[in-house]
Amino acid sequence: MRDLYHATSHPSRHLFPQLVFLKRTSCLFCCRTHYEPSNKRVKPVVKSNSLTGVITPVKTPALKRIGQSISRSISFRTEARPLPPAPLRSRTKASSYPRRRNSQCWSDTVESHDLTAKEIKRQEVIYELTQGERQFIEDLSLVKKVYYEPMLKLDIMTENELGQIFGTLDSLIPLHQDLLSRLERLKGSEKTIGQVGPTLMNWFPCLEAYVTYCCNQVGAKALLDQKKHEKRVEHFLRLCQESSFSRKLDLWNFLDLPRSRLVKYPLLLKEIQKCTPPEHPDEDTLPDALELLHSIVAEVNKKTGEAECQFYRRCLAYLEESQRLQEIQLSRFLYCHGELKNNKGQVRLHVFLFELALVLTRPGEDREGGQVFHVYRQPLPNALINLEEIPDGEAGGGGTFRGAFTGGNDKVKNCFRVSSRGRSKAHPYSLQANESFSKQQWITCLRQAIVQSRDGTAQTSQSHSLLDLDSPSCPYERKWSTLLIQDRESSGGEAHLQINTCLFPLSCE
């Protein structure tokens, strides 16, 4: 009882006001049992390390309700581990707020400076570049020490599985340590950096190592999502995310940091160039460095798109041999993919808009729990697609679509229809997006895919007509023109639609 009294008089009583009632209830029992006969049979009290063990059972309805309220209001992770009120309060406070990054500016690190406003801005951007490298190295090292090594030692995952998920992440650390040391050597006596262009120009080719890492990310994400269904993996990752060092970020947020860092370099370099005054030594080198950087990022972006396309092509499971369109195998990238509802509004489909074909699938799992997409109905070649946007509020234009999504009561929203020209097996598909923004993204991507596929078909047909003019009996072999992957900075990566921006899903993360 003394321990219980001290618990209620602790400052943490504001977190557990029920403990005050517990004290009064217990005191009431002391007064009542003081006049009980000495020969009354008393039930022995079993010792317990949890607070619920000191709550004695009561028969009075009012007191019983209080005891039940206390029992319901207090929950513990384990009954064998005591959790005093004070540590519990500090633990809750620590886990509620993630640790923040140091937002110190360059001007905060120097006592005085005699620079123009433009030069100060330039130093601030260079300082942001330097500090970003330092924090990036810390995060990559944290991933290795806190996630990779413990999971390997505890046998939570096999070495092969960890290798697939983490990829070449470990090899990126020395690359960025090298850049950080180069930038630190450029600092003058007043912590200013003069010419930075040649240093960046010489280091940017190291970013070609990102091709291997980024190409592995699609498969790594799929395997990580699969392993999260295992209890040990889920428990370990949840404990890490709840810890302060993770800043409330999950493992994939850390594994995706290299992609985010790669996207940041062009933005920082443009800002440095913008703040560089005329006749500065960097005036001539920064444009060349930016051009080199863009070419490297474009190459990483292209290879990543090709790897993503190949991954999802391997995940397709065909129910009929006629579904294996040549256009699917010839596609090299994805415009977008995501969740849509079918024409009945009940079946959720995962739709892929490949470079040359539109494929409707139903997601599932293979025998090993891996991700698989069962092809639903007949795929449509993009060059033969007819796209029809259905305005919101229109209850369908007749046929099977009338009342398909709503049962004939509510208005249809966020719907569009695709059909194929000259394909008897391909019926029109009426599809519904989750929201209007997602619908517009689908329509934009579909229009782009249709136009580019038809242009490619026309160019190929024209070249075949010129080449095969003297040999009309030569069998026609369909070929497609090369389409360059644009660095589209449109939105993507949300739950119901993923635009294939590869490295640039900026607005929906």
Image (cartoon, rainbow, N blue to C red):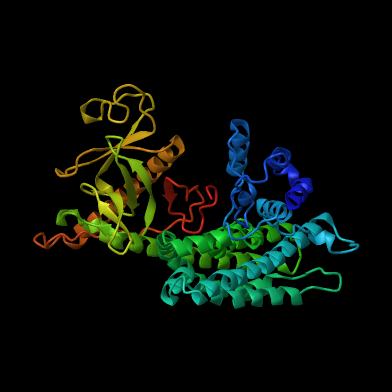
Q: Is 30 rendered above or below residue 181?
A: above
Residue most toward the front?
39
Q: Residue 22, position in %: x, y?
A: 69, 41
Residue 208 in sight here: no
Residue 178 in sight here: yes
Residue most toward the top?
409
Q: Is 138 rendered above or below residue 324?
A: below
Q: Residue 329, position in %: x, y?
A: 26, 61
Nearest to the observer: residue 6 or residue 231:
6
Q: Residue 60, position in %: x, y?
A: 60, 33
Q: In which quadrant of the rendered view does residue 186 lie?
A: bottom right
Q: In which quadrant of the rendered view does residue 127 lie?
A: bottom right
Residue most toward the left?
473
Q: Is residue 482 left or right of 94 when viewed as pictured?
A: left
Q: Is residue 82 left or right of 435 when viewed as pictured?
A: right
Q: Is residue 326 left or right of 83 when viewed as pictured?
A: left
Q: Is 302 rendered above or below residue 50?
A: below
Nearest to the observer: residue 166 or residue 240:
240
Q: Residue 182, position in %: x, y?
A: 70, 76
